[in-house]
Image (tube, grey):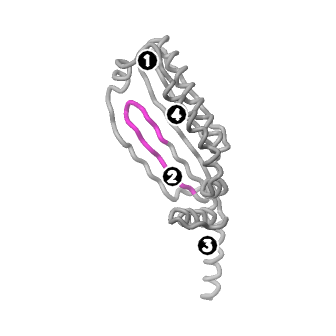
Amino acid sequence: MGLFLIGIFVLLIVLLLFWTVKAELKAYLSPKGIGVHFHITLLHKRLFYFERHISTFENLLDSLMASLEPSFDLSHLEDFLSKQELSIPHIKKSPQYKLLEKTIHINKLTWNTNLGFGDAAITATCCGLAWTIKGMISHYAKQLLNYPPSLHISPDYTKNTFSSEVMCIFSFKLGKAIVTAYKLSKYRKGRRISS
C-alpha cells in the first residue's frame, strides 16, 4: 500500500511538472499612485498573489501642466532608441534569450492609457506624443517578444486626468521553467550549458 501511494505521489509530481502555469503581471500609474499586481495560477487555482501600492503622489497633473511647453523635442529619445535597435539582434542571439523564448509564451500584452488636460489642443498634442512613444516602444517589444502589444489611448478633452496600465499574461510549463532557471543560473556563474 505504501509503494502504491509513493507511485501516485510521483505521478502527480510528474504531471505537475508538465502542466502549464499562467502568470499575470499588471503595473499601473495614476494620480492615486503607482502599483503592481502579480499572480500565478495552476489548474485555475491561484497559487501566488502579490499586490503592492508603491507610492502616492498628489498634484501630478498640475505639476505636469506647469512644465508643459507648446513644442516637444523627441531627438534625444529617438537617438537613444536608434542606438538600442543595434543591440536587439545581439540580444536575440544570446543563449539566455533563446532559453527564455523557448520557455515563456506570451498570451496577452496590453498597454492602456487615459489622458486629459482639460484643453482640447493640449490633450490632442499630448495624445499624439503618447502614440509616438508607444509606437516606438511597441516596435522594439515586437522585435524582442515576437508578439505585437495591444496599445490604446483614451483622450479626455474635458478634465485633467492621467492613468496608464500595462498588463502581460504569460504561461510556462513548470518543469521546463525549473530546467531553464537552472541553466540560467549556470550562465550567471560563467559556465556554459548546452541547450
What is the crowding at mark 4: few (fewer than 14 residues within 10 Å), some, or many (at least 20)? Answer: few
The circle drawn on residue 13 is 3
> N-terminal of the two: label 2 or label 3?
3
Q: Which residue occupies 64% across, 61% down?
A: 173
The span from disc 1 to disc 2 (Cα, nearest Å) is 34 Å
Which one is nearer the viewer's eye here, 132 or 95? 95
The span from disc 1 to disc 4 (Cα, nearest Å) is 28 Å
> N-terminal of the two: label 1 or label 4?
4
- Magenta: predominant secondary structure element? strand
Residue bearing the label numbered 2: 39
Which one is nearer the viewer's eye here, 45 or 85? 85
What is the crowding at mark 1: few (fewer than 14 residues within 10 Å), some, or many (at least 20)? Answer: many
Residue bearing the label numbered 1: 117
> N-terminal of the two: label 4 or label 3?
3
**Residue type at numbered disc 2:** His
The circle drawn on residue 12 is none
> N-terminal of the two: label 2 or label 4?
2
Looking at the picture, does residue 57 appear above or below residue 120?
below
Q: What secondary structure is marked by label 4?
A: helix
Looking at the picture, does residue 6 appear above or below residue 56?
below
Q: Would residue 48 be found to the left or right of residue 56 on screen?
A: right
> N-terminal of the two: label 1 or label 2?
2
Location of residue 151 (image quadrant): top right
Q: What secondary structure is marked by label 2?
A: strand
The circle drawn on residue 80 is 4
Q: Would residue 160 be found to the left or right of residue 112 on screen?
A: left
Give the extent of the magenta segment.
27-41
Q: Is residue 34 magenta?
A: yes
